[in-house]
């Protein structure tokens, strides 16, 4: 119930392509869904987040799509760039708790 | 102007030793966290403190003891280090809960 399942484990995309990473959860009490980006040797950094009252949130080339009935959410990276190569983590939590539950991460490689 | 800082960045030690990792945040946040990232990059919360009070204590061996002298600092002390403790440890902080800012990490290697 506390798990967040993330796929794929790794993803290779050509420059200019679309990268899509998917996450699924079981706990319907989750109501905050962030995505974190982590570069090698660095700490994770918040990229974009969504609450379940909206189905989509876009910030620049990054879009979160949220499907409440399916208990799934995904990150889309449009026009992927080599600089986007990093590990991406989805996460979920319950508003009011301090605990983020992370997916296992997706290593994205964008080839030039 | 570092937001969340950790020392040391690398820590190499022998099994059985005791070591500490220090964390400081200058963001004025009330809540601080310790996470462990294993070799497969899996991130798992260990502890969380809010205004120096422990609020999250996951299933962590009691060889790990967090200490928060004030709300800007959260240190992690590890006794009797084991091989399986080798990992990257991240400190994080937040004001509005859930928007967590992570430090650069401390890579602990136990030989």
Image: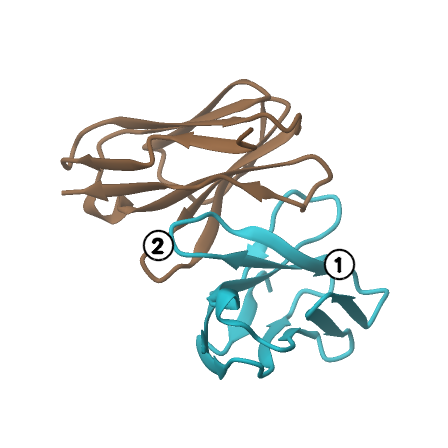
Q: Nearer the viewer, residue A58 or B24?
A: A58
How many neighbours does mark 2 have within 10 angstroms: few (below 14), some (14-19), or many (20 or more)?
A: some
Question: Who's the residue at 61% across and 47% down the image?
Answer: A99
Kindly report the distance in space between the C-alpha atoms of the residues bearing marks 1 and 2: 27 Å
Vertical position of residue B41 compared to residue B51: above or below: below
Residue farthest to the front? Answer: A112
Query: Where in the figure is residue B92, as x and y percent of width and height?
Result: 54, 39
Q: Which residue is mark 2?
A: B38
Name which residue lies at 71% across and 70% down: A64
Does residue B53 sit above or below A32 in this rendering?
A: above
Please give the chain letter of the residue carrying mark 2. Answer: B
Residue B29 visible? The answer is yes
Along the line of sight, the residue nearer the viewer: A50 or A24: A50
Q: Position of B16 compared to B6: left or right? A: left
For residue A73, what is the image quadrant?
Answer: bottom right
Identify the chain drawn in cyan. Answer: A
Q: Nearer the viewer, residue A111 or B43?
A: A111
Element at label 1: loop
Give the image location of residue B11, x and y in percent.
Answer: 25, 35
For the point 46% across and 54% down, the residue is B43
The chain coloured brown is B
Q: Is residue A33 left or right of residue B2?
A: right
Query: How many numbered marks, from 0 up?
Result: 2
Return the mark for residue A31. Answer: 1
Judging depth in this view, the residue of A88 and A81 nearest the camera is: A81
User: Where is B30 relative to A85, above or below?
Assistant: above
- Identify the residue at horizontal 71%, vertical 71% (top origin): A63
* Residue found at the far top of this picture: B69
**Residue B73: percent from left, percent from top:** 52, 22
- Indicate the position of residue A36 as horizontal and vertical percent values: 58, 57
Q: How is the image coloured?
A: by chain
């Amino acid at each position: 119930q506390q798990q967040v399942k993330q796929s794929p484990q790794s993803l290779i995309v050509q420059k200019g392509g679309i990268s899509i990473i998917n996450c699924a959860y079981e706990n319907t009490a989750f109501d905050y869904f962030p995505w974190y980006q982590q570069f090698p040797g660095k700490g994770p950094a918040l990229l974009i987040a969504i609450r379940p009252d909206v189905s989509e949130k876009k910030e620049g080339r990054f879009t979160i799509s949220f499907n409440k009935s399916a208990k799934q959410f995904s990150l889309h990276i449009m026009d992927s760039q080599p600089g986007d190569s990093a590990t991406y983590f989805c996460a979920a939590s319950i508003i009011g708790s301090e605990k983020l539950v992370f997916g296992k991460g997706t290593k994205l490689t964008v080839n030039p | 102007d570092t937001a969340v800082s950790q020392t040391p960045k690398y820590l190499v030690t022998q099994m059985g030793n005791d070591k500490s990792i220090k964390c400081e945040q200058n963001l004025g946040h009330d809540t601080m966290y310790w996470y462990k990232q294993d070799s497969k990059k899996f991130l798992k919360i260990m502890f969380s403190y809010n205004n120096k009070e422990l609020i999250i204590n996951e299933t962590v061996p009691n060889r790990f003891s967090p200490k928060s002298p004030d709300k800007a600092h959260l240190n992690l002390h590890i006794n009797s280090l084991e091989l399986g403790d080798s990992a990257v440890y991240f400190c994080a902080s937040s004001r509005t809960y859930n928007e967590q800012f992570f430090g650069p990490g401390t890579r602990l290697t136990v030989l």
